[in-house]
Amino acid sequence: MTLCDLDTSLVLTHWERNYLRWELLACDEVRGVFLTTQADVLTVLFDGDRPDFEEWASTRVPDGEELSEARQ
């Protein structure tokens, strides 16, 4: 298990940040997601090492179009 920071600067609104947090919690590789004092960072308890996390995270952070579709 590894604690990793996830940059969420692409996520602009509070709603989008909460949506991303719930999506992360639904992933099998994620054991926990924690808010930080930084507005654009979530700490993720990941079941794996840092290189695995970075590869995994690069495919998980939604772009604006996906978030817009999720609102509908």
Image (cartoon, grey):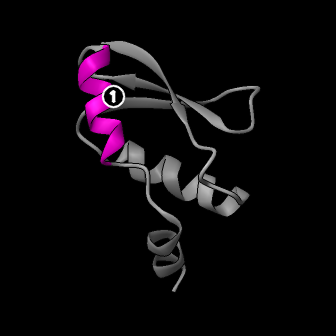
- The residue indicated by pointer 1 is 54
Q: Main secondary structure of the magenta part?
A: helix
Q: Is residue 61 above or below residue 64?
A: above
Indicate the position of residue 46 as horizontal and vertical percent values: 33, 24
Nearer to us in this view, 9 or 48: 9
Who's the residue at 40% across and 45% down the image?
24
Q: In which quadrant of the rendered image does the N terminus lie? A: top left
Nearer to us in this view, 7 or 1: 7
Who's the residue at 47% across and 51% down the image?
22
Who's the residue at 36% across and 13% down the image?
2
Q: Is residue 33 left or right of residue 40?
A: left
Count of numbered marks:
1
Q: Is residue 36 above or below residue 39?
A: above
Dividing the picture into quadrants, the one containing residue 4 is top left
Dividing the picture into quadrants, the one containing residue 42 is top right
The answer to if 62 sits in the magenta stretch is: no
Q: Amino acid at mark 1?
A: Glu
Describe the element under mark 1 as helix, strand or loop: helix
- Per the rendered image, the range of residues in magenta is 50-59
Dividing the picture into quadrants, the one containing residue 35 is top right
Indicate the position of residue 6 as horizontal and vertical percent values: 51, 32
Indicate the position of residue 16 as horizontal and vertical percent values: 61, 60
Q: Is residue 48 above or below residue 69?
A: above
